[in-house]
Amino acid sequence: MALDAGTLQIGGESIESSWFLILAALLFSIGSVGILVRRNPLVILVCIELMLNAVNLTLVTFSRQLQNLDGQLFALMSLTVAAAEAVVGLGILVDIFKLRELEDVDDLSELKG
Amino acid sequence: MNWLPLVILLFPAVGGALLAGRGWRWPRPLTVIIGPGVVWLSFFAVLYGYWTDVNVDQTYWTWIRAGSFVLPVNLLLDHLSLFMCLVITGVGGLIVTYAVGYMEHESDASYARFFCYMDVFVFSMLLLVLAGNFVFLIVGWALVGLSSYLLIGFYYWRPAAVVAARKAFVMNVIGDVGMILGTFVVFLQFHATTYGNFGWVPKSDSGYLELAAFLFLVGAVAKSAQLPLHTWLPDAMEGPTPVSALIHAATMVTAGVYLVGRLHPIYDVAAVAHHTVAIVGAVTALFAATIAIVQVDIKRVLAYSTMSQIGYMFLAVGMGAYAAGFFHLLSHAFFKALLFMSAGNVIHAMDDEQDMRRYGGLWGQLRWTSPSFLIGSLALVGVFPLVGFFSKEFVLGAVFSKPDDPVSIWVWVVGFVTAVLTGFYTGRMWWVAFWGRPSETRPVEQPHEAPGVMLIPVLILALLSTAGGLVQTSALGFGTTLVEDYLKPVLGALAWPPSPIELIVTIATFAFGVLAFLGAYLMYVPRSERRAAFLDGVAEVAMAQPRPWSEQFPRLQALLEHKYYFDELYDFVFIRPLNWIASWGDRRIDRTVIDGSLTGVAALIEDGGAGLGALENGYFRSYVLVFVGGAIVAGLIVLWRAFT
Amino acid sequence: MISAIFLAAALIALGGAVGIVLFRNPIASVLSLVMVMLALSVLFLLLSAQFIFAVQVIVYAGAVMVLFLFVIALLGPIRELPTRRLPRQGFLAVIVAGGFAVLLVSMLGNLRYHAPANADLSVFGSVQNIAFGLFTTYLYPFELTSLLLLVAAVGAIYLSRERRS
């Protein structure tokens, strides 16, 4: 069977699925830049959420392209996990904040050597 | 199975082992009993062997069987080895007993150490003479060298002693190499590991036979301190006096003579090596006698005298007069041990002073030691009727009489001149130390005689030196030949009859020797101190008080004092290049290459570790950076594999 | 028209993402994330993921982001001061992430698929379809996910317990 580029028929019009995928890739990369560059721990968590969202977009796109609902279900799980992780992460963050005046994630560098 | 050879060996071995294991914790009386005691026990075993006329080559066990190489553990107790055992255990026993008194000042542990080493030495020397094959000969040979090293360096806190011990050991090892190579040649060419009555020796001379004979000669020369491997013997006097008496006069240094005697079937065929033995002996005898003239340390005079007398023994066995050589070995053991022990008594009395020039006038003050020393000196000079006369004249007479040998007359001349010189240096030693007025620089005004345990062995040896000649009076042309007869089964009879003028030659040698002895009186005892007026009268006529030779012939004096510069020569030719090579090796190879590669590996790992450690700086952000970078690499790899 | 919707949503998403990274004020960053999420939810709708669209808006943008805002309010203002540690981090980050982006884009942009079955996809991502999958094939992960949420809740309670100092 021949392979061709993924075209989606949405609302009577054609659109390439690769556009969605490239958008997701860009969002993911921007999120990774944010993790690498920002030193406020909260903002780092926000960037992680961004990356998770980009992945969700990819999953849903593939689901639509391959006409298989597994992608959406996985995206649902991912979303749930992201929520749980945000809760716990913020809890830890609040703890550290209460312990000392944390402003810079570089201050947490005891595990060195 | 005859156990006697093993028993003879075992007593001193057990003694040495016990003293090594427990001796340092024992009360001293126990060491006194065991140390000398085992040597005497061995002596009684040897006497038993003599009375029962034992003659056995006993194999106890076969040690190695490797194809054609079969090495048994066998001990040979024939007349020659029993003769040697008598000397070793008898004279050795006397000396070890003497040492009980001489070494008294030592601590208990040090005392035990001394007797342990002495017992080990006696065991090693017995093994050497009792060995029935070349391998155990070498084992005994090497162990004797070890004992010598341990005993010379007994006072190990003295640098001079340590250096002397090392020098002795190194030169002995050179000899060991000769012995080992000789054994190899014997095995490879003649397929013999044991003596086995020497049936394997070919009847005609060959290159390999000469080679083996020369290699064994190297061993003999090193062990017996003959030229050119002689420089260790005078330095060996750093050891305690009993050590000098036992090892460096009576026994170890005679091992070379024993070797030539035992291997005489080889030397009888290998004529070149055989003559070399005699020439080496003769040259050494003369050489050592000249050096003895200028020595001021009483022990060094005796050391060079030993070197010279062993030269006589080599001369004898080198010319084929084996019995004569061994008789001189026996007689030398008597009077040289006597001389060393008497000298030990003098040193003891003089508060450890060994410079003869600071003695003087001891004759009246040491009532027992002085006559003993005189007997020893006269025996050394070869005065009738002491044992030295009979043995030395036996040697010289046999050499003189030997027909059909172009070398014999020359070595006899050397022997004759040496005998005269022997008289001279011995006389010098006697007059300077015991006669005349006491020196101003004498350390002790009223020297006391030695205690009983140190006197009795001396007196016994004095008796033996006086009467010992009676067993072999052949030098006079008639009388007893007990030594020669006893050794005949092993060494054979003297192959030529005495020459008609041998007796005249004998008397001439004796006369000139005595004249030299007396002449030394004139040279060395200043006129103001001479006690016999009539000799003064003779001197007035014969010569004026001579100026000391050291002023008349300064360069000759320097040559003799520096022992012909042999030590300087060896230092220049061998020691310095070796030191240079060793330090070069240390710098360039050991430190740079070996240490460098090891520390280099360590430094590499350390730096690598430090470098990798820099990655773990504790910062979350840099970890993520590496993480993402890694993800890219992983992605690329997956892509690449998918597309190829 | 679909392309136009896509373009608008994509631009908003990208702009929000850049805003997250660049805003100094953390509240601004969080609000940018909210904007991104809303844009993405529109895209989900375009892709016939109706249930996901709803969940994204209600749970993600509605609950999780509000939680973030509450934490920021709790902790007070935080400023990032310039630092000397890891000096080359920004430069390397752009390089690495840029490489990452190139890799991803080149991979994802060149995918090839089998021809689709051409079914009617109007109710593709409907609640019923999701429910079918969730309660039959994926029941096990579903239960585990709920367990995970329980664990997170327990964790949150534990983390916020009163400490006796």
Image (spheres, coloured by chain):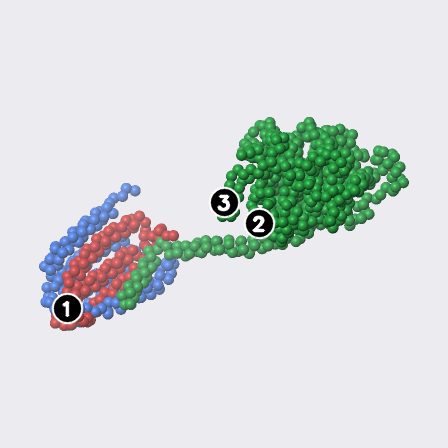
Chain colours: A red, B green, C blue
Across and down, in percent, residue B515 comes to 82, 39
Label 3 chain ID: B
The answer for which chain carries disc 2 is B
Q: Where does label 2 land, which residue? A: B190
User: Which residue position holds label 1?
Assistant: C116
In this picture, residue B80 sits left or right of residue A5: right
Q: Are marks 3 and 2 in contact (CB under 8 Å)?
A: no
Judged from the image, the secondary structure of the residue bearing numbered disc 1 is loop
The amino acid on which the numbered mark 3 sits, given as a three-letter code, is Arg
Which residue is found at the position 78% from the left and 50% from the top?
B555
Q: What is the x, y in percent for residue B13?
A: 56, 35
Residue B94 can be seen, yes or no: yes
Task: Confirm whether circles 3 and 1 share one chain.
Answer: no
Q: Secondary structure at mark 3?
A: strand
Image quadrant of residue B588? bottom right
Looking at this view, is B39 or A27 the one in front? Answer: B39
Compared with B625, B5 (above or below) is above
Q: Quadrant of residue C9?
A: bottom left
Find residue B65 and name its label. Answer: 3
Residue C14 in view: no
Near mark 1 (Cα within 10 A), the count class, few <14, some 14-19 or many ≥20, is: few
Type of amino acid under label 1: Pro
Can marks 3 and 2 be said to lie on one chain?
yes
Q: CA distance from mark 1 to mark 2?
A: 100 Å
Residue B376 is marked as: none
- The quarter in which the C terminus of chain B is drawn is bottom left
Image marks 1 and 2: residues in contact by CB distance under 8 Å: no
Taking the image as shown, residue C56 lies to the left or right of residue B589, namely: left
Q: Residue B116 sits in which quadrant?
A: top right
Task: Identify the residue shown where x is 34% and y is 52%.
Answer: A108
